[in-house]
Image (tube, rainbow, N blue to C red):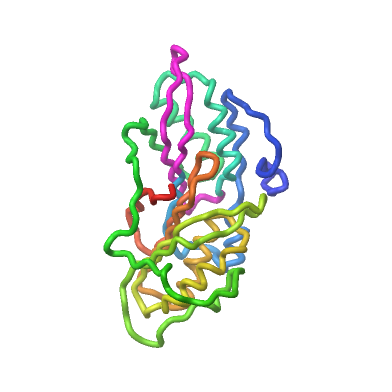
Amino acid sequence: MQHSLDHAPLGKTSAYVDTYAPELLFPVPRQDKRDELGITGQLPFVGVDIWNAWEVSWLNSKGKPQVAVAEIRIPATSTHIIESKSFKLYLNSLNQTHFDGWPQVVKVLEKDLSACADGAVHVVLSPLDRIPAYGKVVDATEVCIDDLDIAVDTYMTDAQLLKADAEGYVEEQVISHLLKSNCPVTGQPDWGSVSIHYAGRPIQHDSLLRYIISFRQHTEFHEQCVERIFTDVQALIAPEKLTVSARYVRRGGLDINPYRSTENSVFDNVRLLRQ
């Protein structure tokens, strides 16, 4: 199977295939980017990539269209991520495909996505009337650092921007909505919000915001950006615990939300306002 991004459908004209075609899914190896970060052997985190698919439809056994929102959880232990345009094209291939019921759709999705990612993918389908209408802003436990009055001149990711106090201890959850990176294939912007929950030496908030902004012209997939932030923060302060998560703005009916943590946490799928 060809895994080079040169063979991916992203950035190319694609035919609209509306009948079941699992061969449209395109896997991208995780390890190439993890090698850049020095991640080999046992992972330094647990985690999951939560995809929300907002344009899922198929035909029931009588030919009546069904619509749903899908929550797809791809474990960080899977060997591959799924290229997003191929994911959308695959979902489109369900549009004129007959299924006997919702459980059959879930079974097919889990089988195909697990095969592509080489990991156990979990899928939940929900009717539209069960989806909350609005996302959250910031809860009381989060500190938003976006209003800091800082000067910025670096827009390519640089871990040297991160600074921490020489001593002290804090447990805090910091959030910024200024995360932006670029798609490695199309060059188009990916907009997101990043949350960093850690316990250890205090990270200087102005340095953390400069670091987050330094992703602005950086080119990586969503999952790779989160793993880079995780490893950079871990290298800086060797925290007792660390969770890095990002909620990305929807594109093509999909939003991708990676979570990486030192803790065996429950990774909630709580939408933000831009989602």
Residue 206 horizontal/vertical position (percent) = 45, 77
Picture quarter with the N terminus: top right
Above or below for 62 versus 264 = above
Q: Residue furthest left?
A: 140
Give the residue at x 33% y 59%. Answer: 138
Specify whether 74 is left or right of 14.
left
Q: Residue furthest right?
A: 6
Q: Quadrant of residue 156?
A: bottom right
Give the residue at x 67% y 50%. Answer: 186
Residue 247 horizontal/vertical position (percent) = 44, 53
Residue 72 horizontal/vertical position (percent) = 44, 41
Above or below for 61 versus 184 = above
Q: Is residue 249 magenta?
A: no
Above or below for 183 versus 20 = below
Give the residue at x 47% y 14%. Answer: 63
Residue 2 horizontal/vertical position (percent) = 69, 44
Specify whether 169 is left or right of 79.
left
Q: Quadrant of residue 71?
A: top left
**Number of dots carrying numbers:** 0
Q: Residue furthest bottom?
A: 166
Specify whether 181 is left or right of 55.
right
Front residue (pair 138, 122): 138
Q: Is residue 63 magenta?
A: yes
Above or below for 134 versus 56 = below
The part of the chain drawn in magenta is 52-80
Q: Main secondary structure of the magenta part?
A: strand
Q: Quadrant of residue 240?
A: bottom left
